[in-house]
């Protein structure tokens, strides 16, 4: 513990020296060894004992993580290892690998500048490896590669020395191919991974050893030694002569950027404000004397201190008692109560934190994940965080005892703040509370925590699939009349083209960007120039265009029109499910000249009715979430794997064989995947390895729509008859 205390003192000294800081994330597919690698780095920095490294799983501090043997929450630690006689401050985030917790990876990538990507030498790159790499590159985070479990190649697969090097080469080529495909500019500017340069290391996190080409000269351990010692089972020799933490540290310090270098490149990617303002200059140069500019990437609850906001400080300094503003929260002052850093599960208070670090502070009561925190009254906010997956499953939650109801509502609000990939719907009238998450495991963990950590005894329903609604056809000039018949709105509804939907999802088209810039992007994607000029609102992946000309009073009424549209999009006419991919064009409006006759009670129902009724005429249909499935099995089990996909309304679209195993790739609707884990195990005698990842929404087959709609309406307490346009168009 004395070493731990010494580390805190060194951390506070080094914080002010950005040249010797590295902010890094450890990212990989599930079970490729991230947390075990983190242990090794912590033991090298003297935070945990060497004997326990690889087994203590220090960063998995939650009892649920220890019980399941997986990382659920990204966890931060600051440590001070020595490299070439110089101390370095490494702020490290260990991230989850399970697809259900991918949101944590997205958030962590905003806080760091470099990523150590782990790949299992035997399994190679997996779906989640691609996802985490994409997230890193999108955020301007530079990757280096650690190929883990090299000992398995020798001892389990029984490869010879040449074959070992060929297989390792293939892994590097595959990761390079992914980097080039995702960001060719970065790849060509020096981000290509190259073993001879030292941006790739090989080893075994479990047995605490690693090698890299530059380090071979220093440690004297060659690939030949690795092969022979692995075959002889002499891991201690390798761990002593080529310790993992030294090799990885060598790679991190030499090849991953410090905040001064990284922020020059990253700020234009994640912040679209004017670089010549004092905050712009401050962030580009990582200036501790500039205004405070911080992005919150994580919120957790401490039973003693309350809400803890963790994030990346891009400029300025934080001290206890400072007054800051959270952009978008009514300009209320938030006063910092404590300023600290995380050392794994423990938060340690410090006097001051300067730009280039990852602080953990209390007192930011208005902050949420993704918010911009600054000492300025006004500031352009950071680019919002884009998650690669969407909630696909929902559970209904009720308090076991009525007296716990107020506490449950409070807890659900807390949970939504902690994990922005969850969607919480609280219906105060019916008492039904819905939690929508990334998958069965995600919901199981969250509901378990509500019971265990928040102390609320709850009853949960069986998981329900999240559907979406969209139109399949075009309908013109649908009329919406206000209840007093004095105001009329005319809309044309049609599906929004896929190319535009993709731009919205990628964040390349939004209401935050300048109108001219947005127009140019839309025209380049094939949209009519007049349409591109007349965008009035973007909600999810739906867009509103105003093609009316010179209508009196429309400007002052437009806010109410948008409100009515938001209400219609929150729950479509078929099954009250969210609407997506809809293009709405306002073509004409007739308004009463007296403001009293065109208030919210008149405009909102007229617009809402027009959109919902129009959707039914334009062929409203349901979209269901689909997951991509990858199953690796021995050759003789191939039939069992394909039938598991095809028997669930799925399709198999690829098969790749390697050695005596085959990988079956396909997709299936989430609604059919309940219980998949148990079924695939028994069908393949427990010999299958599988992964699923979110693959978007697809139309529910025509013959099933009515049954699905009626079942959803019944569950929600709506009329069980299929709705008609007349229900909405009075």
Image (cartoon, grey):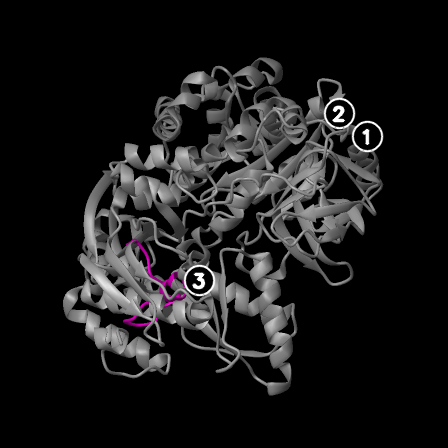
| Residue 17: assigned label | 2
Quadrant where the N terminus sits is: top right
Compared across the picture, whether 589 is left or right of 323 comes to left
Q: Residue furthest top?
A: 217
Instruction: Say whether marks 1 and 2 touch (CB < 8 Å).
Output: yes
Gap in Å between the C-alphas at discs 1 and 2?
A: 8 Å
Q: Residue furthest front?
A: 593
Secondary-structure class at tag 1: helix
Secondary-structure class at tag 2: loop
Residue annotated with mark 3 = 560
Identify the image quadrant of residue 175: top left
Q: Nearer the viewer, mark 1 or mark 3?
A: 3
In this picture, which residue range is highlighted in magenta? 565-584
* Closer to us: 35 or 532: 532
Q: Is residue 50 above or below residue 258?
A: below
Gap in Å between the C-alphas at discs 1 and 3?
A: 54 Å
* Closer to us: 210 or 519: 519
Residue at horizontal 59%, vertical 28%? 248
Instruction: Say whether marks 1 and 3 touch (CB < 8 Å).
Output: no
Residue annotated with mark 1 = 13
């Amino acid at each position: 513990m004395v070493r731990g205390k010494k580390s805190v003192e060194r951390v506070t000294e080094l914080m002010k020296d950005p040249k010797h800081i590295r902010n890094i994330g450890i990212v990989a597919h599930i079970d490729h060894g991230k947390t075990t690698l983190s242990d090794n780095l912590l033991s090298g920095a003297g935070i945990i004992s060497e004997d326990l490294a690889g087994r203590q799983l220090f960063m998995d501090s939650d009892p649920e993580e220890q019980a399941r043997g997986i990382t659920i929450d990204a966890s931060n630690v600051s440590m001070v290892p020595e490299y070439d006689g110089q101390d370095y401050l490494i702020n490290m985030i260990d991230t989850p690998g399970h697809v259900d917790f991918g949101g944590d990876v997205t958030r962590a990538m905003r806080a760091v500048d470099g990523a150590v990507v782990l790949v299992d030498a035997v399994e190679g790159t997996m779906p989640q490896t691609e996802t985490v790499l994409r997230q890193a590159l999108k955020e301007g985070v530079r990757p280096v590669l650690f190929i883990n479990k090299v000992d398995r190649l020798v001892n389990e697969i029984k490869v010879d020395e040449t074959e070992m090097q060929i297989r390792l080469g293939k892994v590097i080529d595959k990761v390079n191919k992914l980097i080039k495909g995702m960001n060719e500019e970065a790849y060509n500017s020096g981000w290509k991974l190259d073993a001879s340069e030292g941006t790739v290391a090989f080893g075994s996190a479990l047995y605490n050893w690693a090698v890299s080409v530059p380090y071979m000269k220093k440690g004297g351990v060659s690939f030949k030694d690795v092969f022979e010692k692995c075959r002889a089972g002499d891991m201690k020799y390798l761990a002593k002569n080529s310790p993992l933490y030294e090799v990885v540290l060598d790679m991190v310090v030499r090849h991953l950027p410090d905040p001064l270098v990284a922020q020059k490149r990253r700020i234009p990617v994640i912040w679209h404000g004017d670089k010549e303002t004092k905050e712009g200059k401050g962030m580009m140069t990582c200036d501790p004397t500039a205004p405070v500019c911080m992005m919150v990437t994580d919120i957790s609850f401490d039973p003693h201190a309350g809400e803890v906001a963790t994030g990346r400080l891009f400029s300025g300094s934080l001290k206890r008692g400072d007054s800051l503003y959270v952009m978008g929260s009514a300009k209320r002052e938030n006063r910092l109560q404590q300023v600290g850093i995380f050392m794994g599960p423990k938060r340690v208070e410090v006097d001051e934190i300067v730009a280039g670090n990852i602080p953990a502070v209390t007192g930011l009561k208005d902050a949420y994940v993704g918010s911009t925190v600054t000492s300025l009254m006004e500031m352009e906010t950071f680019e919002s965080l884009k998650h690669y997956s969407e909630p696909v499953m929902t559970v209904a939650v009720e308090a076991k005892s009525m007296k716990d109801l107020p506490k449950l509502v409070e807890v659900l609000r807390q949970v939504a703040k902690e994990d922005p990939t969850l969607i919480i719907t609280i219906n105060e009238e019916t008492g039904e509370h819905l939690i929508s998450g990334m998958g069965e495991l995600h919901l199981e963990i969250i509901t378990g925590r509500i019971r265990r950590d928040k102390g609320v005894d709850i009853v949960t329903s069986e998981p329900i699939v999240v559907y979406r609604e969209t139109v399949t056809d075009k309908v013109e000039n649908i009329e919406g009349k206000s209840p007093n018949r004095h105001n009329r709105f005319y809309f044309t509804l049609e599906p929004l083209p896929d190319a535009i939907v993709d731009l919205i999802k990628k964040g390349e088209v939004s209401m935050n960007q300048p109108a001219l810039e947005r127009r140019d992007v839309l025209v380049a994607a094939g949209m009519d120039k007049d349409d591109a000029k007349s965008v009035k609102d973007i909600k999810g992946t739906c867009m509103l265009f105003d093609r009316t000309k010179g209508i009196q009073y429309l400007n002052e009424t437009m806010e109410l029109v948008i409100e009515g549209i938001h209400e219609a999009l929150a729950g479509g006419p078929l099954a009250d499910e969210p609407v997506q991919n809809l293009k709405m064009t306002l073509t004409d409006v007739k308004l009463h000249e007296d403001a009293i006759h065109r208030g919210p009670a008149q405009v909102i129902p007229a617009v809402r009715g027009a959109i919902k009724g129009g959707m039914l005429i334009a062929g409203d249909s349901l979209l269901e979430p689909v997951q991509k499935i990858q199953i690796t099995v021995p050759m003789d089990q191939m039939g069992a794997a394909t039938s598991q996909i095809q028997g669930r309304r799925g399709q198999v679209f690829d098969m790749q064989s390697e050695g005596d195993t085959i990988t079956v790739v396909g997709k299936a609707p989430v609604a059919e995947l309940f219980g998949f884990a148990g079924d695939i195990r028994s069908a393949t005698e427990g010999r299958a390895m599988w992964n699923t990842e979110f693959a978007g929404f697809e139309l529910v087959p025509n013959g099933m729509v009515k049954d699905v709609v009626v079942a959803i309406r019944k569950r929600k307490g709506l009329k069980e008859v299929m709705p008609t346009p007349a229900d909405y168009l009075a």
